């Protein structure tokens, strides 16, 4: 059996959100080295602040300054920091109840080792040298034996308040396409397209998944399809994608390769976008060293009759 492929894969996108008055004051305060909580209807001071009361669900805006010192309520040692975490050396994730607060804040605690950390230990905020109005303005917590410092008297009113944040949502993982798609990808390396035939309904699925999506039975009979095919449906793309060197407008289509029981997608080139149509006969165009067709172009054949591809729409 050939080796099954696997490769690292990263999914990442910027998540942008606007801030209400409470979160705006909290993050702007961090930029100014001030920690603000909010008082709930039961009198508790919540840090980080919530925008709505956890008991009554009503909006709350009574901001309260708390100290940058506090007490560890619980913790866990992180012996191997990952990309994007607050510290590059081993540290503790700690829940810290700041002086004046009734709830705990999760952040990194810089300590020489797990033996130096314990529940009840006193800590203080180590501020980042450059602060922009984000939770990372708290670089981490560090051990502290002194008394809480005097509060600044901040009320939440600041010049140039932070009104929005952009956070990168990212997922790093190792992807393995499995036996069926490994064979499909390897065939593409030889400029061939292969699917797998269902032993029950006899349809050929491209790309193969190792099982028939209709019958639910395993598939392993490989069938070469194409290279030519028929445009079944398509859309015209008018918005240029970031990091994609293709001028708009262009056409992205579902293409039923000859012999396939399922349409795959690909870009259509070689003719004006407004001349692409259902039934257009196309063939793949490969570029040097590519693992898949760059686009599909017209073959010059007459358009396919609708009845030959209507089941593949």
Image: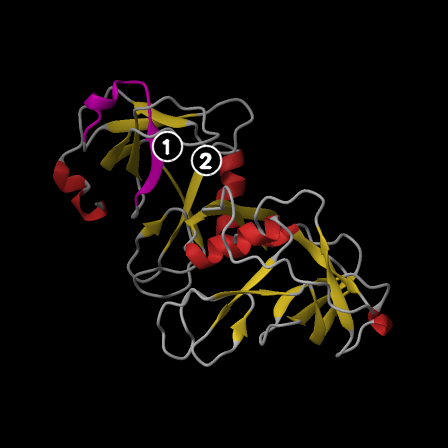
Percent from the top left, x then y, of residue 220?
45, 56
On the rendered structure, is 256 left or right of 152?
left
Q: Is residue 69 above or below residue 15?
A: below
Few, some or many residues within 10 Å of mark 1 (<14, 14–19, 20+):
some
Q: Looking at this view, is 196 or 137 the one in front?
A: 137
Give the residues in magenta.
263-277
* Quadrant placement of the N terminus: bottom right
The answer to if 121 sits in the magenta stretch is no
Mark 2 and mark 1 residues within 8 Å of each other at the beta carbon: yes
The residue that appears at 73% across and 57% down in the rendered structure is 81
Residue 145 left/right relative to 133: right
Question: Residue 264 or 260: which is nearer the viewer?
Answer: 264
Q: Where is residue 40 drawn, in percent x and y? A: 46, 74
Q: Is residue 8 above or below residue 241?
A: below
* Residue 192 position (above or below residue 111): above
Residue for badge 2:
192
Please identify the quadrant where the C terminus is shown.
Answer: top left
**121 to the left or right of 35:** right
Tell me if mark 2 has few (under 14), some (14-19) or many (20+) residues whose alpha carbon lies within 10 angstroms of its own: some
Comparing 223 with 23, the one in front is: 23
- Secondary structure under tag 1 reads loop
Residue 45 position within the rendered picture, expressed as x and y whole percent measured from the top left = 53, 73
Res. 172 in view = no
Q: Which mark is residue 227?
A: 1
Spatial CA distance of label 2 from label 1 is 7 Å
Front-lying residue, 12 or 276: 12
């Amino acid at each position: 059996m050939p080796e099954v492929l696997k490769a690292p894969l990263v999914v990442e996108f910027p998540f942008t959100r606007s801030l209400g008055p409470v979160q705006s004051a909290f993050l702007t305060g961090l930029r100014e080295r001030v920690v603000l909580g909010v008082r709930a209807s039961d009198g508790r001071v919540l840090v980080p602040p919530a925008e709505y009361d956890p008991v009554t669900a009503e909006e709350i805006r009574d901001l309260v300054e708390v100290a940058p010192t506090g007490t560890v309520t619980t913790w866990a040692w992180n012996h191997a920091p990952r990309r994007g975490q607050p510290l590059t050396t081993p540290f503790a994730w700690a829940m810290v109840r700041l002086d004046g607060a009734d709830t705990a804040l999760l952040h990194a605690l810089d300590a020489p080792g797990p033996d130096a950390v314990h529940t009840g230990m006193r800590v203080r905020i180590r501020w980042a040298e450059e602060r922009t109005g984000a939770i990372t303005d708290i670089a981490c917590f560090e051990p502290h034996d002194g008394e809480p410092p005097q509060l600044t008297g901040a009320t939440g009113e600041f010049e140039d308040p932070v009104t929005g944040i952009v956070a990168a949502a990212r997922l790093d993982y190792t992807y393995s396409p499995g036996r069926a798609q490994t064979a499909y990808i390897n065939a593409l390396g030889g400029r061939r397209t292969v699917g797998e035939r269902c032993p029950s309904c006899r349809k050929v699925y491209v790309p193969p998944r190792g099982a028939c999506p209709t019958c639910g039975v395993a598939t392993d009979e490989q069938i070469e399809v194409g290279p030519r095919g028929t445009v079944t449906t398509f859309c015209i793309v008018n918005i240029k994608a970031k990091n994609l060197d293709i001028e708009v407008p262009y056409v992205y289509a579902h293409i039923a390769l000859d012999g396939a029981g399922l349409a795959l997608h690909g870009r259509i080139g070689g003719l004006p976008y407004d001349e692409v149509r259902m039934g257009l006969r196309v063939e793949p165009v490969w570029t040097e060293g590519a693992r898949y067709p760059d686009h599909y172009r017209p073959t010059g054949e007459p358009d396919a009759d609708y009845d030959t591809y209507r089941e593949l729409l």
